[in-house]
Amino acid sequence: EPEVTQTPSHQVTQMGQEVILRCVPISNHLYFYWYRQILGQKVEFLVSFYNNEISEKSEIFDDQFSVERPDGSNFTLKIRSTKLEDSAMYFCASSERGGPNTEAFFGQGTRLTVV
Amino acid sequence: AQSVAQPEDQVNVAEGNPLTVKCTYSVSGNPYLFWYVQYPNRGLQFLLKYITGDNLVKGSYGFEAEFNKSQTSFHLKKPSALVSDSALYFCAVRETGGFKTIFGAGTRLFVKA
């Protein structure tokens, strides 16, 4: 069964450092997403990406964040200068279509710890 | 704005008993509702969705959900719980006119042997 894969599973970084979280969406999917889940809190939407551009972003997704699809398979989330409060589980997701009746499929997540 | 609420932080049930995890929704327009499950140290797995049609939706692992428009509810159910069903369950709604999935706070299900 096709699945979304994320690497690494766990990343520890020092405050102020840049991190890149990587994802390989399901191959025939066209819409890509990043979500995050701070420990014990809700899963929060960060950004959606379609046709090589951001289609929607939340207020969390400020100038420190960027996304890119550098080739035909990878989808990355970059945090330029990490803060302690960026520590969270980051989930990549993809969907075949962008409509409201389409489920998104999620990866296993990358646990980011900022020290 | 679309939202979902899960009124219970935790549900405890004995193995073999039926389980219900509650969810209520608030949407403008047609509701598109989903259930996801998160096992420890794992990602979110899609269980089922309601788009239109039958109010009883069947999904993965023997789960089903009942859509009730008058009560604006979408409760997750299973006739006979397994210990392996113990996990964190999220109700969700896809935003109409947007791209994001909006999640409830989650309900932790404990199934005791």
Image: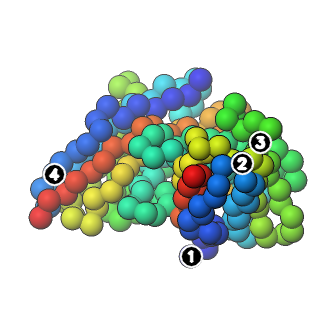
Measured as percent of width and height from the top left, residue A57 is found at 74, 37
Under mark 1, the amino acid is: Glu
- Subunit that carries the residue with mark 3: A
Q: Residue at x 64, y 55 (%)?
A: A14
According to the picture, the residue beneath numbered tag 3 turns out to be A64
Q: CA distance from mark 1 to mark 3?
A: 34 Å
Badge 3 vs badge 2, beta-carbon distance below 8 Å = no
Q: Residue at x 87, y 53 (%)?
A: A52
Residue depth check, mark 2 versus mark 4: number of the one nearer the observer: 2
According to the picture, the residue beneath numbered tag 1 turns out to be A1
Under mark 4, the amino acid is: Val
Horizontal side of residue B59 vs B15, given as left or right:
right
Q: Secondary structure at mark 4?
A: strand
- Subunit that carries the residue with mark 2: A
According to the picture, the residue beneath numbered tag 2 turns out to be A16
Question: How packed is label 3: few (under 14 Cα within 10 Å), some, or many (20 or more)?
Answer: few
Q: Residue at x 51, y 29 (%)?
A: B3
Q: Secondary structure at mark 2?
A: loop
Q: CA distance from mark 1 to mark 4?
A: 31 Å
Q: Secondary structure at mark 1?
A: loop
Q: Is residue A25 visible?
A: no
Image-quadrant location for residue B75: top left
Badge 3 vs badge 4, beta-carbon distance below 8 Å = no
Q: CA distance from mark 2 to mark 4?
A: 45 Å
Residue depth check, mark 1 versus mark 3: number of the one nearer the observer: 3
Instruction: Check the image and report above or below for A91 versus A60.
Output: below
Q: Is residue B61 visible?
A: yes
Residue depth check, mark 1 versus mark 4: number of the one nearer the observer: 4
- Position of the C terminus of chain B, as image quadrant, is bottom left
Question: How packed is label 4: few (under 14 Cα within 10 Å), some, or many (20 or more)?
Answer: some
Under mark 2, the amino acid is: Gly
Total labels: the figure holds 4
